[in-house]
Image (cartoon, coloured by chain):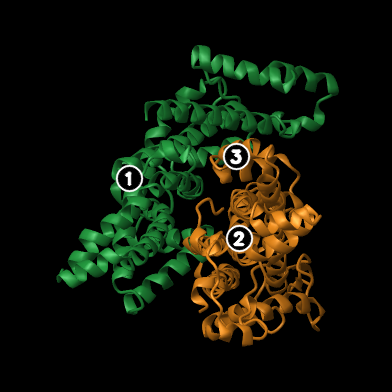
Amino acid sequence: MASYLVKRFLRSFITLIIILSIVFILVRQMPIDGYFQNFEKLNEAQIQNGLHEMGLDRPVFVQLFDFFKNLVLHGDLGTSRIYRAGVPVAEILAPKIPISVRLGTLSLLVSLLLGLPMGLVMAKYKGKFLDHLGTAIIVLIEAVPAAVYYLFLQFYGTTALGIGMTMFSEADLHNPVYWILPVLSMSLGNMTYYAMWLRRYMVDESMKDYVTLARIKGASETRIMFLHVFKNAFVPMVQYIPTSFLNTVIGSIYVESLYSIPGMGGLLVDVVKRQDNNMVQAIVLLFATVGIIGLLLGDLLMVFMDPRISLTKKGGDR
Amino acid sequence: MSVLKHPKIDKLEQSVSSEIKQQFSQEELFSIAPFDEAETERTGAGSYSYWRSTLRAFRRNKIAMFLLIMLVVIVLFTFIQPHLPGQFDPNAASFEVTATGQSKPLKNSPPDSVHWMGTNAIGQDLWARLWAGTRNSLFIGVMVALIEALVGIVMGVLWGYVRKLDFLFTEIYNVLDNIPTTIVLILISFIMRPAMSTLIFAMSVTGWIGMARFVRNQVLIIRDRDYNVASRCLGTSTWRIIVKNLLPYLVSVIMLRMALSIPGAIGSEVFITYIGLGLPADIPSLGKLITEGRKLLASPSKRYQLIYPTVILSIVTVSFYMIGNAFSDAADPKNHL
C-alpha cells in the first residue's frame, strides 16, 4: 500500500507538471498585439523592445524552464502584468482563494444533501410518480445548458430575494442571502449527477440475492433500502465526490463572473482576455492541483470505505 | 463540457462489453456435444436482428418518437426558412422612416406582421436570426460530435491494437483526463482567431478521450479472440478485422455518446459567447442571441428577445438528450430478449 501511495503521488505530480507545461506553451501562443495597448502605432523595434522587457522574446522552452526554476526554488509565481501591474500574483490570489473554496465547498455540500435523498427516493419508488418526477427534473437540468438556466435563476432569484443582481461590495460578500443563488446554481449540476448515479447503483444493488434474502427474512423495505442497498450503493459513489470538484471548478468560472464574485473563476476569464500570463498560469496551477488531489482522494476514500477494493491489484487503473 | 460520464453511457458500455466478453466456459468448450435430433432439423438462424430489435424498442417509446420527429422538422426548417417568401437577411438592419423624413434603424421593434419576432437592439430581424442561429449552433454541435467520434475511434483502435503505443496513450489519457476542459476551451478560443472552426476545434480537442478509452478497452478484449486469431491466420487484414469484427459491436455506444455531446457542445457555445470569446459578429448563433437577449432581461417589454432563443435551444437540447436516453435503453442488448 505504501509503495502504491508513493507511486500514485509521483504520478499525480508528473501529471501536474505536464499540465502546467501544456498550458504554459498554449498561453505563449496568444496573439502578440494583446500585450500592447496601442499596437497599431508601434513600429517593429518598439514591439521587439516591449517583448524583450516582458521576457517573451526568448524561446518558449527557456521561458518554461525559468518558470519552473522560480516556482521550485523560490515558490515565486511572478508578478501580474496588467491586472494589477507589478503586484506579485500570490498576493493578488491570496484573498480570492478562500472565497472560491467557500463557494465550491458549500455547493458540493448542498449538492450532496439534495442529490443523495433524491436518488434514494427515486430508487425506492422506481417506476412510480416520484421517480418520473425526479427523472423529469434531471432531464431539464442536464439537457438545458447551464449557461441558460443560470441566467433565469439569477434574474428571477434576485428579484424574489429582493437583492441586487451581482455582489458588488465587501458587505454583500458577508451577507449569507447573497450566497444562496450562486451556491444553488453551482450545486444543481452535481445534484442531478449524484441523484442519477445513486439511483442507478441502488437499482442494480436491489436486484442482488442478498436483498431477496433480507426480504425473505422479513426485514422491512425501509430497512433493506437504508441498511443494505444504500450502504453498498454508496461505495462506488464516493469516487465521484472528488471528481465533481472538477465540475465545481468549471461551474465557478461561469457563476463567479455572472455574479461578479471576487473569486478565482471569474478572475480567470478576465486575465485570459487581458493576457496576464503569470496570473493565468497561477490560476491554472491551482485549478489543476485541486482536480488532481480530488481524483487521488477519491481513490483513497474508496479503499477506506470498502476494504474489499485493493488499488495495488488493479495497478492504478481508475 | 461534459467532464463527467453519464450513467446511461456507462450502462450501455457495460452491457455491450459483457456481450462482447460473453463466451463459453472451459468445460463447455471441451465437452462432447450430444446428438440432438431437433438441432439437425433446424434450418437457418433465428429471426433475431440486433438493429431490428433496437428499432422496434425505440419506436415503442412515444415521447422519443415525437421528439425525434420534432427535431427533424426543426432541422429541415432551418434550411427551408431562408427560401420562404418575405424573409429578411439575419445580418441586415431594417430601417424605418421617421416623421422628419429621415431613415433610422428599427430598434427593438416588438413582434408584428412584418418582423414576426420583432427586431433586436440594432434593428436586425429576430425571426431570421433565430433560424440562422439555430442552424449554426446545430452545425457546431453535430461537427463536434462527429469529430469526437472519428478521432475517438481512430485513437482508440490504435491504442488498443498497437501494443507499443499502449503505455504512451495511457499516460496521455491520464494527463488529458485531469485537465479541466473549460480551461482548454477558454485558452484555445482566445488564442485562435474567432471563427466557427476555432470553436469546433476547441470543443472537440478534449472530448474524444472518453470514446477512445471505451474503444480501446473493447479492442483489447476482442483482438485476440479465437475467431480473430483464426481470421488473421487466414490472411485477413487488420483493417478488415477492425471494421467487420469490432466496430459493429460499438455502434450503439458511439451513437449514444454523439447524441449526448451535441447538446453539450451547443451549451458550451453559449458559455463561450457569454464570456466574450464566441463567433465573429456576422455569424448569428443561439449563444449570441441569448447573450444579446440577456442584456434586455430587466425590461419586461423586450424580454421576448431572450425567451424565443431560449425556447428553441431548450427544445433542441432536451430532444437530443431524451432521444439519446431512449436510444440507449432500446439499444441495450440486455433489454432485448
Mark 1 neighbour class, 10 Å CA radius: few under 14, some 14 to 19, many 20 or more: few
Write down the quadrant of residue A234 in the picture. bottom left
Residue type of the residue flagged with mark 3: Thr
Mark 3 neighbour class, 10 Å CA radius: few under 14, some 14 to 19, many 20 or more: some
The residue to which callout 1 is attached is A308
Query: Which badge, 2 or 3, comes first in the chain's sequence?
Result: 3
Write down the quadrant of residue B114 in the picture. bottom right
Q: Is residue B120 visible?
A: yes
Residue drawn where x is 66% and y is 32% of the image: A27
In space, the residues marked 1 and 3 are separated at their CA atoms by 26 Å
Residue drawn where x is 79% and y is 57% of the image: B234
Q: Is residue B297 visible?
A: no
On screen, residue B290 versus residue A300, left or right, reads: right
Residue B261 is tagged as 2
Chain given the colour green: A
In space, the residues marked 1 and 2 are separated at their CA atoms by 35 Å
The residue to which callout 3 is attached is B170
| Residue A313 % position (x, y) | 43, 38
